[in-house]
Image (spheres, rainbow, N blue to C red):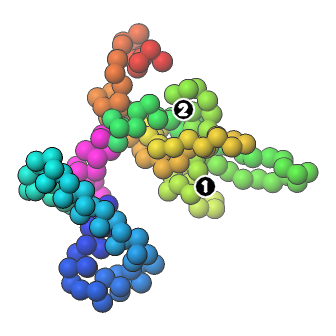
Amino acid sequence: MAVNQAYRQEADNGQIAEQKFCDRYSLSNTILKMTMGARNQLLDVLCNNCGFPYDSLGDIHVSTRGQDLNLDLLMSMLVSALYPNIAYYKGKRKVGRAFRITFQLERFQVYTLEQTSALVSKMSMLTPLQGDAIQPPSPLLVFTEKLRTRVISCKELSVISAVQLLLFGSRKVECVGENLVRLDDM
């Protein structure tokens, strides 16, 4: 979101500024233009066909440096849209033997609501670089897609809080004991 906003600001300064922005950050100018075109088409449909006032569909400026309440709002909306795609961070998993070769590879492992174990996609921002240790601020994650190959892996994960899950994700909340809550009979 922040990249698209910065790109649109540079596009207002002309084509040369737009191209310099893409070159500086190794971004695809074509994809960003297509994204901006799709956004404009969606805004036109919402305003002209659905009757939304154009002023209500303005940009939400996001700060990429530190806490931002707009990001909390967007994460809550993601929880509502993607539920029950919720996972719980378990820790690292060591992968051992393949094709008679023993190797060490650490991957993050999560539990999904179906109570299956899954790995975090290697392309995820939550996957640390070699040797780096990462501990998410909350063990709860929301994901967009679960890939089933030899191993199950989750893609496009975002860290969420328990309050976001309680308020925006679950449909039924029960207190089943002291400090114990059951969501949606799971």
Q: Count neighbours of disc 1 (C-alpha within 10 A) and say few if under 14, some if 14 to 19, many if 20 or more.
A: some
* Res. 171 image quadrant: top left
* Res. 13 image quadrant: bottom left
101 vs 88, left or right, is right
Q: Secondary structure at mark 2?
A: strand
The segment highlighted magenta reads 66-77
104 vs 80, left or right, is right
What amino acid type is highlighted by mark number 2? Answer: Thr
121 vs 95, left or right, is left
Residue 84, position as x, y percentages in the image: 44, 31
- Residue at 28 percent across and 29 percent down: it is 167
Pointers 2 and 1 in contact (C-beta within 8 Å): no
Instruction: Tell me if residue 47 can be seen.
Output: yes
Residue at mark 2 to residue at mark 1: CA–CA distance: 17 Å
145 vs 63, left or right, is right
Mark 2 lies on residue: 112
- Residue at 53 percent across and 38 percent down: it is 89
Look at the magenta stretch and give its main secondary structure.
Answer: helix
Residue 130, position as x, y percentages in the image: 63, 62
Residue 141, position as x, y percentages in the image: 45, 40
Residue 57, position as x, y percentages in the image: 15, 54
* Residue 126 located within the stretch drawn in magenta: no
* Residue 68 located within the stretch drawn in magenta: yes
- Residue at 76 percent across and 53 percent down: it is 104
The answer to whether 77 is drawn above or below residue 165 in the figure is below
Q: Secondary structure at mark 1?
A: loop
What amino acid type is highlighted by mark number 1? Answer: Lys
Q: Nearer the viewer, residue 30 or 108?
A: 30
Per the rendering, the mark at residue 122 is: 1
Q: Count neighbours of disc 2 (C-alpha within 10 A) and say few if under 14, some if 14 to 19, many if 20 or more.
A: many
- Residue at 84 percent across and 49 percent down: it is 98
